[in-house]
């Protein structure tokens, strides 16, 4: 079941399923327009069945320049970082791109409002996010006719962006900002009778299911930008991480 939901890159279908959100206009000016839409998540039905009901539909915000055709525009898909449960921050980051005729598609965070029963639920949400973003990229370029495509993300959104930007059949620029820290509570490990090293090994095994190195090198590696962090706003620096 796990291998079916998290296949190797060469086993994944391309092209993905296109999406057609139901749109409503939020505001409009002489030079730009903001719309919000909803579409049913485009994942394997087994994955959809495993997701919380509130994650069966995905939300997006679309900030676009006006008076220019998609063929003459680029488009950037923005993925959410940890705790980024609204569109505002990513729309704020994408606003200046409008001046360069770059539209911004912001995918709603699946973690916002999700009622997870166990840690493995995070992997399911991550896989659904990757699949949704892949469908958006395909729809924007192949069906809507946008020229150059890009995908970006902060924190866990950066991890998801790498998974989509590295698909061999896509020609996507990728920008990510990812911290290298991971948190394992030592006190919790002691209560279960296992060592912190065993906890880290188990966590590494679980996270290997979504490891970015499972994907081949992109066709154009020069279009991928990584920003590594030495500190993390959510996770304190602790001795076994420093070592």
Image: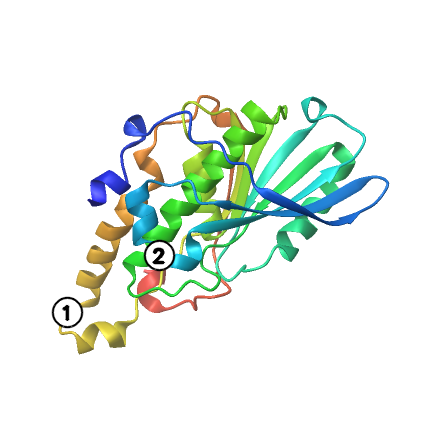
Residue 153 coordinates in the image, percent (x, y): 53, 46
- As helix, strand or loop, the secondary structure at mark 1 comes to loop
> Is 235 on the left or on the right of 139, as rendered?
left
Residue 178 visible from this viewpoint:
no
Q: Nearest the camera: 184 or 9? A: 9
Q: Is residue 1 above or below residue 100?
A: below
Query: From this viewpoint, which residue is outermost toward the right?
Result: 30
- Residue 130 visible in rendering: yes
**1 or 2: mark nearer the eye:** 2
Disc 1 crowd rating (10 Å Cα; few below 14, some 14-19, many 20+) is: few
**Left or right, 50 with reference to 102:** left
Secondary element at tag 2: helix
Q: Which residue is mark 2?
A: 122
The one nearer the camera, 172 or 60, is: 60
What's the colour scheme?
rainbow
- Which quarter of the rendering shows the C terminus? bottom left
Q: Position of residue 162 (x, y in %)?
A: 44, 38
Mark positioned earlier in the residue sequence (1 or 2): 2
Relative side of 32 to 208, left or right: right
The quarter of the picture where residue 160 lies is top left
The residue depicted at 67 percent of the width and 50 percent of the height is 91
Residue picked out by circle 1: 194
Q: Position of residue 37 (x, y in %)?
A: 60, 47
Q: Residue furthest left?
A: 193
- Label 2 Cα crowd, 10 Å radius (few <14 / some 14-19 / many 20+): some
Q: Please count the marks in the image.
A: 2
């Amino acid at each position: 079941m796990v291998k079916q939901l998290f296949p190797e890159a060469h086993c994944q279908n391309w092209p993905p399923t296109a999406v057609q959100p139901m749109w409503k206009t939020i505001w409009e000016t002489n030079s730009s327009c903001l719309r919000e839409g909803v579409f049913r998540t485009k994942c394997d039905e087994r994955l959809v069945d495993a997701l919380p009901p509130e994650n069966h539909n995905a939300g997006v915000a679309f900030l676009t320049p006006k008076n220019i055709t998609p063929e003459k525009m680029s488009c950037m898909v923005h993925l959410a970082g940890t705790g980024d449960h609204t569109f505002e921050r990513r729309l704020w980051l994408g606003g200046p791109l409008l001046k360069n005729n770059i539209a911004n598609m912001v995918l709603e965070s699946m973690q916002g409002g999700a009622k997870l029963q166990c840690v493995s639920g995070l992997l399911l949400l991550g896989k659904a996010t990757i699949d949704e973003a892949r469908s958006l990229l395909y729809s924007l370029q192949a069906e809507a006719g946008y020229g150059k495509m890009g995908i970006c993300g902060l924190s866990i959104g950066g991890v998801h962006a790498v998974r989509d930007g590295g698909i061999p059949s896509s020609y996507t620029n990728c920008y990510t900002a990812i911290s290298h820290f991971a948190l394992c509570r030592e006190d919790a490990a002691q209560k279960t009778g296992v060592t912190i090293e065993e906890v880290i090994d188990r966590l590494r095994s679980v996270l290997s299911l979504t490891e970015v190195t499972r994907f081949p090198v992109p066709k154009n590696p020069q279009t991928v930008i990584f920003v590594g962090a030495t500190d993390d706003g959510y996770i304190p620096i602790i001795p076994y991480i420093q070592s």
